Image (cartoon, helix red, strand yellow):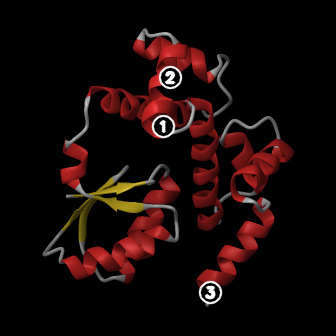
Amino acid sequence: MIYIKGMKTLAGIKIVKDELKKLKMKISFVGMGEVNIKGIFTSRLHDKLNKRLHKFDMSLLDTKEEKKLNSQEILVESICKVIFEIFNKYKEKPLYKYSVLISEQFNISYYLLNKIFKRIKGKTIQQYINTYRVNIAKQMILAGILNFSDIAFMLHYYDESHFARQFKKETGICPRDYDKNIHETLNN
């Protein structure tokens, strides 16, 4: 079993499957953040796959690193999982703020959760959510399945212009330019 960081959507699963096929690797299972590969997974294949995944803001995880998590890091990873679940559970913007949904999940004040989260991740929960949404949007743009308006809706933005502003703030370019640049790069 190999673990993949940044594999956050169904589009991400499709991207990983496609990259594994390009490397002629046989798989028995692909789930959110994990892949079971048939046969031998050599360090050469590891490096090739990791290089390909970096193009999509994903990377392979070292399982030894994952085992070294302390309790606060585990809490932060749990918060990240809740954020993932929020975006998979709510197809429309939830009625409650993310802060309420997250703090209720852990029965801990959002202020304390945010303080711990910032110490471990170096950014607030809201900053993480903003980055998370933009990274999912990048994967959706790469997959070419949805238009920008649908992406904005699925990622709980108020509208397409709010999505474009947030995307540009995170990446430095607007979604349309990103789409154009990434497809030009992939076609070369």
Amino acid under label 1? Phe
Q: Of the residues under marks 3 and 2, which one precedes in the sequence?
A: 2
Amino acid under label 2? Lys
Q: Which residue is mark 1?
A: 84
Residue depth check, mark 2 versus mark 1: number of the one nearer the observer: 2
Q: Residues within 10 Å of mark 3 (few under 14, many from 20)?
A: few
Q: Which residue is mark 3?
A: 187
Measured Cα–Cα span from mark 1 to mark 3: 31 Å
Quadrant position of the N terminus in the picture: bottom left
Q: Is residue 47 left or right of residue 7?
A: left
Q: Which residue is mark 2?
A: 115
Residue at the spot 35% in from the left edge and 26% down from the top edge: 75
Judge whether 111 appears above or below 128 on screen.
Answer: above
Amino acid under label 3? Asn
Q: Residue furthest bottom?
A: 188
Q: Position of residue 132 (x, y in %)?
A: 57, 45
